[in-house]
Amino acid sequence: MSIYQVDRVQYIESQDTIILFEFYLVDNIDNFIKEFKGESEAFKNSYIEEIYLQKLRTLWDLSVKNETNLFIIIYDEYEDKILFIERSRYKKGFTWDALDFKSFQRKFIDLNNMSGAGESKKLGSVRQDNKDTFTLNILENISNDIDSNDDNGLALTKKLLGNFTTKGFDFDLFQYIESTGETVIYEFLKNETSYIKNYTANPMRYCWTGKPNDNKQKFISLWLASQKLNGRLFLINYSENTEEGIGISEIIDLDVSKGILQENKYNLTYHEFITLMIDMNRYDSEDMDYMKKYNYKMRSYNEIFFRNWDINKKNYGKT
């Protein structure tokens, strides 16, 4: 298994770096802490499933390679004590502390406020549901190795932040490909309109518009994070109707003030998309053209096209 969810990411503008957050729900935090003890073999803890350890090792290695911070938050259903583990970009190894809820809340809010200037929203306004069923369904399709304790921490994060706005976001699915050394970020965008189809959906239709409901910050953050992680960013447009197919946009270039500047667009059937994700999960080639099998379906859009988006959008995504 090489494709995972990443629970929370923050881009820290003042430091030009990102923080990766991972949440893990255990049955009893006191028992976990007793075994943990902060030793070098800590992540062989018997309370952690092996599939989660694989994910944790991947994120750990990635944070070292890209000089980013990794924070691991372990808790139980009572949420009265939280184990906070930090791998700092400035230090070797890690530090840890067991904190009561209020103490950890203060630390978490301080971290949340590091993100710098810009638009932000309350977390609850971004996602009402605490689970992304479509993403979980994709994971179940590509592998039987799913750790039910690998909690996304969204309910806890909402409780920690309260009325504070946040610029934190998640990676719906994330992959580090050892054979190419690249990170791939998959962001799933649910299409709930009747007049725009998955094949013609694109964030430029509702972002960088100057309107109050503009959601451009989400895509700016994803783009900046992908760049810090030597990554590729794929936007997956889907709907409840799988017969409608899946629109995949690989963002090649993006300007934070203007929007998308260059993109490769692939329109796949739902079956083709699932096959692609299965193939990606076991990808071991040095070839960085991950979409080679579907290049015959690719349409490229350049800066000239996007500069004249209002005129050209009627031709976008058409097969």
Image (cartoon, rainbow, N blue to C red):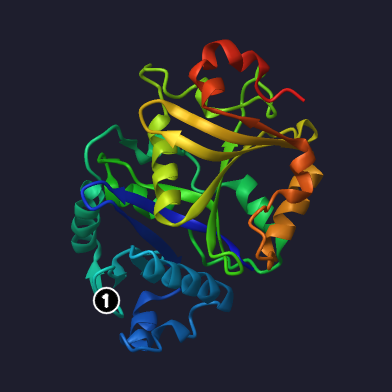
Residue drawn at (39%, 81%), measured in percent from left and top? 32
Q: Is residue 238 above or below residue 98?
A: above
Residue drawn at (35%, 65%), measured in percent from left and top? 70
**In the image shown, does 302 or 71 lie closer to the viewer?**
302
Regarding residue 153, the answer to whether it shows in the image is no
**In the image shown, does 143 or 302 lie closer to the viewer?**
302
Q: Quadrant of the C terminus?
A: top right
Residue drawn at (63%, 36%), measured in percent from left and top? 264
**x then y, percent, for residue 155:** 41, 51
Q: Quadrant of the N terminus?
A: bottom right
Circle 1 is placed at which residue position?
96
**In the image shown, does 11 or 167 lie closer to the viewer?**
11
Q: Is residue 119 left or right of residue 51?
A: left
Regarding residue 99, the answer to whether it shows in the image is yes
Q: Is residue 25 above or below residue 277?
A: below
Q: Is residue 139 above or below residue 308?
A: below
